[in-house]
Image: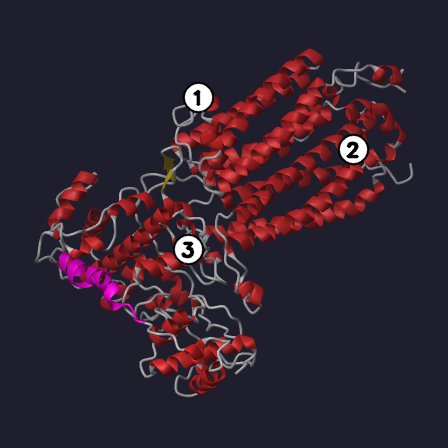
């Protein structure tokens, strides 16, 4: 019976558009990071037009071979518009593919969020406002994470997971691990928020605040690294490979992110003074706005979003498996929250 | 076993997403609050900013000149604020107190076209080909909007970013108490300072570099004038510094007041401007220390190098007494505790003790950065913050380093200085002579 139901072949288009939207969103986030790193947010003073042109009609040569700030800012706008168009196609595909109100609403919410994000970007330019720039920088990763969630819920893996859930039911009843994953997802986003404040620092604020942000970012980063490491160790109990690969990827990404974070600090502010007894630190000159600095600093920001996306993917999958398990084994959803003993 | 299976795989989320949202309502609310707090904390306008007054200088003068607990009359504060706003404008609309005479030599100090390019919020015009707000884009996060070296990130840096308001710059070709040349400032901006947070700007176009140089001079002169004004008003006993003509909220009103101030030959403000601060900036190009011909013995590959370095060593431990601070590289040395002039400027105020934090509390509240010891350069490394060329090392030894305990060498001959240069250059080679 179950196999028959799952053998039905629902449209793959929402998932395909979702994946494309997620990919474009990630590139868009990277470009947004470039805009912030190179302080190019005001490289185009008008919005939604670009130097008086319709955004799509701005001369390609002037954009592509023009000043770097113009290249990244206008490129960011074009990518943002592309994300908006893809979100529209996603809504159309979703409405054609399913009767699920939740998924339909989800797709519309994504479209609304990408429009909201575009308007935020416009207000940030027109008002040259740090508050809006910060908010703009925070909505981007949130949108990316939600698109990842949509992709997971519309994936072939999701439509087939019931069978696996029955086979490996012991793994999915672990409420403790799941709660841990949710907490780490939320902390990961908070870490992005602190990082966003560090990147959008305003010239008028007191120097007393910035060190607190730095220490918070450091402390959260160390906590996330250790907690993810512990989570990685404990996921040996999660036999399901559909969850484990994400944890491996997260552990690797966190290591890369820590290294990128250290590099980012050095590329922005140099080595700590107590290292100047070593020649490599004493002779290092901060290379401001060079391509090397720009790409490394932006990579740190983008990796943060990638980690958020991975946590989202993991948490949504974990939740789906737990819910499937609970609906397949017990009429009461609460029962699923109870941890299952090993080997059952 | 009763199961609840959706009709198709794709429709399945109906059963899972909704409980997920409900189950974690608290987490979603916490997340929304976190976003809101984070964004509100960063809320600052980018336009309409004002230069902050030098509260540290005022507090210092009050401690020096007034009875305990006595503060400056608020009317003097208004007068200084009005004069400063008229003479130098605002961060978005800078001005400069050039004298009325168009032929004045003071007009050579800086170009207001350059200052306008570097001032204001970050922006681009002319299809991105002309960038504005260069100072806020490249410098203000560390050096601060007013050039006080106390930008948002300053406390995390060691050494602290330069406070331009004292008019002192470390690495320059002019003697102590003479401002740096444009070339000196441009060199630091272009090449950065190794081992510090001062970055190199290799890709900065020449006109943007020139704009930043002029803006640094503008902030430095502004800061010097403000310090002199605070000093002036703390000497006044009730008589006004200037008569303020009503509100000065528009650029036109400030310009009219500025013209009135600079054309009054008897005013204390013009004396500060045209007899004290600005002449030093005009004369600096004539005060550049001439390096002269570099002796062959300074070059490491020269056959004379060993002799030069050996003589330099004698001077290093003897007559020049460099060993007192720098020690012998490779050997442990007891380094004396020193602070630079930017710290000494206020920590030597009566009642302040750098070892007792509470005595510094008022100054730190007023905007001073906590004192940090200055450390002599480790000469075992071929890394010199002001540049490693023979000329740069000569200038460091000859002129000293402004604002630091590194003195000028008035008692050394040119040959002796070159011998010291040779010895300093030999140290990273393991003392090869």
Alpha carbons under labels 2 and 3: distance apart: 61 Å
Tell me what residue is drawn at x 49 percent, y 57 percent. Answer: B156
* Chain letter of the residue carrying label 2: A
Alpha carbons under labels 1 and 2: distance apart: 54 Å
Q: Nearer the viewer, residue B36 or B170?
A: B170
Give coordinates of residue A269: x percent, y percent. Answer: 50, 55
Relative to A268, residue A48 above or below: above
Q: Mark 1 points at which residue?
A: A54
Disc 2 element: helix
Which color scheme is applied? Answer: secondary structure
Whether B14 is among the magenta residues is no
Residue range corresponding to the magenta coloring: B270-290
Disc 1 element: loop
**Discs 2/3, front:** 3
Give coordinates of residue A338: x percent, y percent. Answer: 81, 35
> Which image quadrant for residue A33?
top right
* Chain letter of the residue carrying label 3: B
Give the crowd class for mark 1: few <14, some 14-19, many >=20 residues within 10 Å.
few
Discs 1 and 3 share one subunit: no
Q: Mark 2 points at which residue?
A: A337
């Amino acid at each position: 019976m179950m196999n028959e139901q799952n053998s039905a072949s629902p449209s793959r288009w929402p998932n395909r558009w979702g994946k494309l939207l997620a990919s474009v969103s990630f590139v868009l986030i990277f470009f947004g990071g470039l805009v912030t790193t190179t302080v190019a947010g005001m490289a185009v003073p008008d919005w939604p037009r670009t130097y008086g042109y319709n955004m799509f009609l701005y001369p390609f040569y002037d954009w592509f071979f023009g000043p770097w700030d113009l290249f990244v800012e206008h490129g960011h706008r074009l990518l943002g518009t592309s994300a908006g168009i893809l979100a529209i196609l996603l809504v159309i595909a979703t409405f054609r593919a399913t009767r699920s109100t939740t998924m339909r609403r989800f797709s519309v919410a994504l479209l609304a969020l990408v429009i909201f994000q575009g308007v935020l970007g416009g207000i940030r330019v027109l008002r040259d406002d740090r508050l809006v720039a910060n908010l703009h920088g925070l909505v981007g990763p949130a949108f990316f994470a939600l698109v990842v969630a949509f992709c997971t819920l519309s994936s072939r893996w999701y439509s087939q997971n019931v069978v696996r859930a029955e086979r490996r039911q012991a793994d999915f009843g672990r409420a403790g691990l799941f709660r841990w994953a949710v907490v780490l997802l939320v902390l990961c986003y908070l870490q992005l928020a602190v990082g966003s404040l560090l990147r959008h620092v305003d010239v008028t604020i007191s120097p007393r605040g910035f060190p607190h942000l730095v220490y918070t970012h450091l402390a959260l980063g160390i906590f996330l690294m250790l907690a993810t490491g512990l989570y990685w160790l404990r996921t040996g109990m999660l036999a399901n490979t559909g969850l484990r690969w994400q944890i491996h990827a997260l552990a690797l990404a966190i290591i890369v992110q820590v290294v990128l974070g250290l590099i980012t600090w050095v590329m922005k502010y140099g080595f700590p003074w107590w290292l100047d007894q070593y020649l490599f630190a004493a002779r290092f000159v901060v290379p401001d706005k060079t391509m090397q600095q720009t790409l490394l600093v932006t990579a740190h920001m983008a990796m943060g979003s990638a980690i958020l996306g991975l946590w989202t993917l993991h948490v949504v999958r974990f939740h789906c498996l737990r819910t499937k398990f609970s609906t397949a084994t017990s009429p009461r959803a609460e029962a699923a929250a109870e941890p299952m003993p090993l080997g059952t | 076993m009763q199961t609840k299976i959706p009709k198709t795989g794709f429709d399945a989320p109906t059963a899972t997403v909704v409980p997920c949202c409900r189950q974690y309502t608290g987490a979603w609310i916490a997340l929304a609050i976190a976003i809101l707090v984070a964004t509100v904390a960063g809320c600052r306008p980018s336009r309409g900013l004002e230069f902050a007054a030098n509260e540290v200088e005022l507090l210092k003068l009050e401690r020096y000149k007034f009875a305990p607990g006595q503060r400056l009359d608020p009317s003097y504060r208004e007068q200084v604020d009005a004069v400063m706003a008229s003479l130098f404008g605002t961060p978005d609309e800078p001005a400069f107190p050039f004298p009325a005479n168009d032929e004045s030599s003071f007009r050579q100090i800086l170009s207001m076209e350059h200052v306008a390019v570097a001032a204001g919020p970050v922006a681009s015009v002319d299809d991105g080909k002309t960038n504005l707000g260069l100072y806020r884009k490249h410098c203000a996060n560390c050096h601060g909007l007013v050039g006080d070296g106390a930008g948002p990130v300053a406390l995390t840096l060691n050494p602290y970013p330069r406070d331009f308001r004292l008019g002192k710059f470390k690495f320059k070709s002019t003697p102590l108490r003479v401002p740096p040349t444009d070339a000196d400032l441009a060199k630091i901006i272009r090449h950065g300072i190794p081992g510090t947070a001062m970055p190199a700007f290799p890709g900065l176009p020449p006109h943007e570099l020139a704009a930043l140089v002029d803006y640094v001079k503008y902030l430095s002169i502004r800061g010097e004038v403000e310090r002199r004004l605070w000093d002036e008003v703390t000497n006044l006993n009730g008589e006004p510094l200037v008569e303020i003509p009503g509100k000065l909220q528009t650029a036109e009103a400030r310009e009219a007041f500025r013209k009135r101030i600079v054309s009054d030959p008897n005013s204390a403000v013009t004396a500060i401007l045209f007899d004290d601060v600005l002449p030093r900036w005009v004369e600096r190009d004539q005060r550049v220390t001439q390096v002269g011909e570099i002796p062959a013995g300074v070059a490491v590959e020269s056959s004379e190098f060993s002799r030069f370095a050996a003589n330099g060593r004698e001077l290093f431990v003897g007559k020049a007494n460099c060993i007192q601070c720098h020690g012998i590289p490779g050997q442990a040395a007891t380094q004396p505790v020193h602070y630079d002039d930017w710290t000494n400027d206020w920590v030597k105020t009566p009642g302040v003790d750098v070892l007792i934090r509470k005595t510094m509390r008022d100054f730190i509240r007023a905007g001073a950065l906590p004192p940090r010891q200055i450390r002599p350069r480790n000469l075992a490394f071929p890394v010199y913050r002001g540049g490693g060329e023979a000329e740069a090392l000569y200038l460091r030894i000859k002129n000293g380093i402004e604002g630091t305990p590194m003195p000028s060498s008035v008692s050394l001959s040119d040959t002796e200085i070159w011998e010291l240069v040779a010895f300093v250059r030999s140290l990273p080679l393991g003392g090869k002579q």
